[in-house]
Amino acid sequence: MAQMMRELDQSSTALGSPVKWAASLQSVVSLMVNSRFPMFVAWGEELSLLYNDAYAAILGEKHPRALGRPFEEVWNEIWDDLTPLVESALQGRASWLEDLPLTMNRHGYDEATWFTFSYSPVRGESGEICGLFCACTETTEKVLAIRSIKAERARLENLFEQAPGFMAMLSEPEHTFEFVNKAYQRLIGDRPVIGLTIREALPELVDQGFYELLDTVYQSGQPYIGRQQPVRLQRTTDGPIEQAYVDFIYQPVKDADGKVTGIFAEGYDVTEQRTVEARLESHARTLAILNRTGTELSSELDLDKVVRHVTDAGVALTGAQVGAFFYNTKDAEGEKLTLYHLSGAERSQFDKFGPPRETDVFNPDAESSGLVRSADITSDPRYGNTDPPFGIPEHDLPVRSYLSVPVKSRSGEVIGELFFGHEEPAMFSEAHEELILGIASQAASAFDNAQLYREAEMEIAQRKKFEARQVLLINELNHRVKNTLAIVQGLAQQSFKTDLPTEDAKASFGARLNALAAAHSLLTRQNWEAALLSETIHDAVTAAAGETASRIVAEGPDVVLPPQTAVTWAMAIHELCTNAIKYGALSNESGTVTVRWSIAETKGRSHLHLEWTEAGGPAVTAPPKRGFGSRMIERALASELQGDVTLNYEPSGVRCVIDAPLPQPK
């Protein structure tokens, strides 16, 4: 263009020879021709046009004829649009316009164009304004592209608006709403969300995991698909938070470099579908429970199982947290309800609340309907309505939703009460009530049958128990008779084989039989189950010592003896007493006998230590040979006790020491 300016025909322009141009014009032209940005200068009274190569492309077919021609002549088709801007520049005011629409004719036809440019005044040597300078760029392609994008977006938005599913476009990184369709607006309650982040627009989503899901999709670039995802939303203005269910996808939107710039959310509100499915599942579950319960009740004769089936079925049908069956019992105070079976809670939790009191909501009276359903029993006027009216008790089961149904026999008698509770209010509906009434009706017949069966079983069991006890008694009697006869036979053999005269042998034998009889009497009083050591010693001493028994002191802790061991102890004490009366401390008027025993722990087992000590009698010497009594004490007693028995003939008196483990409790 610099060459063309130098070769410009001076007769075709008012600019004159370039060598005579003003220095300011030459400076602007030098700047212009060395720039690759489209520029032109309009100089002089005619505003003759000079421009660079980049601007020549904008002129189209007007170039090169436009060089040096008046500005108005070159752009006469848009002069009306440019005149205000030109006049403003010539008055010293610069201007800047972006994407100005101009209808140009530069290729032989009119075409819509858009330009971004600025007009600046150019001053001469004396500071006067001699023309204007323009730096410009054609933005036609950009404007048309934006329009195309907007049109496409509008078309897509129109499609989105008509789509049955919800859609939303979020820009990153804050998940800001750029677009939502009507279905999305319906989902969130028609709230204005455009320009807001999801945390600002939908604050109720906190702690539901959706913010975190979006963060993960943005960071990973991987989509997320949710199926029947529960979400709590405020679906009406100023309304409550509602439970909804959605199928959706979070699809990351990426630029040419693969960077995530947004997230497209699309899905369907499947709350109604989920509700219908849940209702169908509930109906199917209810039918299954009813069928199973009916089958169980029709064939079950075990009362405990009948009660459990009915109570558990009621809990399953109503969704109760706790269910119970209270059996109607009668005593001197009248009818009352007693807990028989508990479902959904530990019995220990129930026991601390005490037995139910007769009130308008818990009444075993057969004349009342007994049916009670309360959305909140704690505020029900019937609750705590007792005589006198104490009101709600301090310690009652912590339930609010309450449902109780009487179970009556075919004769109309109240068998018991089915009770169901939940800590949340309004959990039981009329449908639940009807289901429990049906279960209670089925249960009544099952209870009657089970009760009859139980009574028959109890009668049979009692008869069998009686028969078994009879057999046991016969066997026990047979065993005791044989054992007693064996003892008597042994006593007879030992008593009559000595050198004693016959009368003395008879007396000794009789005394031993008396000792045996005393032991048997003691055991009979205890049903032959056990005897205390103290009682065994007392009875044996009383039988053997007679009036001298008062000089025998016995003391020690309680020790329980098995029957056979008690008999052996009694016989041993008898022999010690007999020897003391004949030869020892009880043979005079001043002698005494002390019997003391104690219990000690040895190697993890309790051991008995007993001492029989005689004092105040004649001097004692050991007999030349052991008699029957001594042998019984040292051998029979030691064997029975599985312990050690020592019999010492000390000059001051006989001393017998017994150490043996205590019998293990059975």
Image (cartoon, helix red, strand yellow):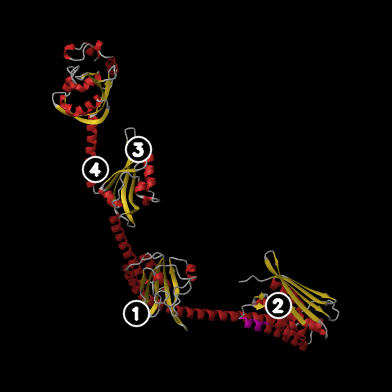
Tag 1: amino acid: Arg
The residue beneath circle 1 is: 410
Real-space CA distance between mark 1 and mark 3, rounded to the nearest whole angstrom:
74 Å
Region rendered in magenta: 519-526
Real-space CA distance between mark 1 and mark 4, rounded to the nearest whole angstrom:
70 Å
Mark 4 is surrounded, within 10 Å at the Cα level, by few (under 14), some (14 to 19) or many (20 or more) other residues, namely: some
- In the rendering, at what x and y percent does residue 190 appear? 28, 51
Mark 1 is surrounded, within 10 Å at the Cα level, by few (under 14), some (14 to 19) or many (20 or more) other residues, namely: few
Q: Is residue 302 left or right of residue 533?
A: left
Numbered label attached to residue 260? 3
The mark tally for this picture is: 4
- In the rendering, at what x and y percent does residue 57 appear? 22, 21
Real-space CA distance between mark 2 and mark 3, rounded to the nearest whole angstrom:
98 Å
Q: Is residue 313 left or right of residue 18?
A: right
The residue beneath circle 4 is: 157
Mark 2 or 3, nearer chain start = 3
Tag 4: amino acid: Glu
Q: Name the element at disc 3.
A: strand
Mark 2 or 4, nearer chain start = 4
Tag 3: amino acid: Val
Viewer-proximal residue among 467 and 393:
393
The C terminus lies in quadrant? bottom right
User: Label 3 near label 1: C-beta < 8 Å?
Assistant: no
The residue lying at 33 percent from left, 70 percent from top is 433
The residue lying at 23 percent from left, 46 percent from top is 161
Tag 2: amino acid: Trp
Q: Name the element at disc 2.
A: helix
User: Label 4 near label 1: C-beta < 8 Å?
Assistant: no
Question: Up-down: is 321 above or below 135?
Answer: below
